[in-house]
Amino acid sequence: MHPVRVDVRTATGGYAVLLGEGLTDHLGRLLDERHIFPRRFIVTNPVVWRFHGERIAGALPGAEVIQVSDGERHKHLASVAHIYEALVCADADRGCVIIAVGGGVIGDMAGFAAATYLRGIGLVQVPTTLLAQVDASVGGKVGVNLAAGKNLVGAFYPPLVVVADPAVLQTLPRREYRAGLYEVIKYGMACSADLFRRVQAEAAHLANPAASFIAPIIAECCRIKAEIVSADERESGPRRVLNFGHTAGHAIESLTSYRRFRHGEAIAWGMLVASQVAVARGLLTSDDDRALEALIMNLGPLPHIADLRAAQTVEAMRRDKKVVNGRLHFVLPTGIGTTTIVDDVSEGELTAALTLVGFAAA
Ligand code: NAD
Ligand code: GLY
């Protein structure tokens, strides 16, 4: 077994992202080799644990398991409090590590608990969704939602190691798998024309989560993200590009109480909105916009947005984290694989773009 290894640099050192089919069975050894504390708490949810618990428990003998409710609507402070209480009950001290086993929701919440419990204990990310393997587990962003908006509370807290096994994606529902593919398209459209073209060319194969097809794509996304976050860990510069599609995406997730859209689906709508703004400004050609739309729409149906009012969506965008000094920073595509960041998109432009994409005008 020769995992792909991608290194991420951080202000405090760095960590490896290890990617390989079957790595789950070697989790204990991989952590031991890195001298990661032997007292280990797995934070997961009942869905992930039902599919993969036996195998993971076998690979991490003696690890204690803390379960939180499944789903984005449970990504809030009450779930983090549940993790703290379980740690306190078990007398967990600073010589402990949290191992986040799940999708991005678990990774973000367990990561936030690790960042804040006793002012910080060790964290290992074991992502089990495509979205978490290509994006959420890498880069150290952890946090939770507030009713007012997505990821409004959080921290930058790098893991000690990320261990991603594409074999676990076999149990992922098709819809969740597609949601991860939208984030792959995000990397292509925002950062890499090569990746975009590859996804276009391999679209028929990618619809099937066979590890042999998807593993090289996951590795490429991790390499792209590692390069960006190594250069800008705390999102003061180039990392902002990774927020392509997130401004409108986060707004519609929050407007629908985190129930209608998978995160990746909301980002897919968000990319289409940002691209319409870019086309209207003359920054993006209609051909490139159509190529993005075709790639997204050919993957399968997205949940509808026709009942969401453009004005309400603009209002929700104004509460986004990307508002700095009252100005909303917006990532706009300028071609396949390139973007620019602007802070002067007007409400009128946003309303026009939302309406063109299909949001309700009034
Ligand atoms: P998720 O964590 O809700 O997982 C999706 C569903 O799949 C859940 O029901 C989960 O229990 C289930 N699941 C997970 N692994 C499975 C498996 N192997 N087999 C069967 N079912 C499985 O959603 P997600 O799309 O992974 O993550 C979305 C979250 O990630 C959002 O909250 C988003 O804000 C966050 N995110 C964070 C970052 C970051 O940098 N920290 C980046 C992108 C997204
Ligand atoms: N998902 C965007 C980032 O990690 O910066």
Image (cartoon, rainbow, N blue to C red):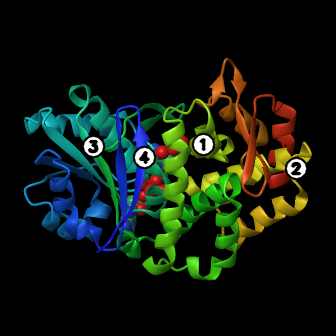
**Amino acid type at mark 1:** His
User: Would you name the residue on which mark 2 appears?
Assistant: 279
Q: Residue at x 38, y 55 (%)?
A: 17
**Amino acid type at mark 3:** Leu
In the picture shown, does residue 326 fall above or below 69? Answer: above
Q: How many marks?
A: 4
User: Would you name the residue on which mark 4 appears?
Assistant: 8
Q: Horizontal and vertical percent for residue 37?
A: 14, 44
Query: Dots 4 and 3: beta carbons under 8 Å?
Result: no
As measured in the structure, the alpha-carbon distance from the residue carrying label 2 to the one carrying label 1 is: 21 Å
Mark toward the start of the polypeptide (1 vs 3): 3
Mark toward the start of the polypeptide (2 vs 1): 1
On the picture, is 4 further left or further right than 320?
A: left
**Does the rendering let one see residue 245?**
yes
**Amino acid type at mark 4:** Val
User: Would you name the residue on which mark 1 appears?
Assistant: 250
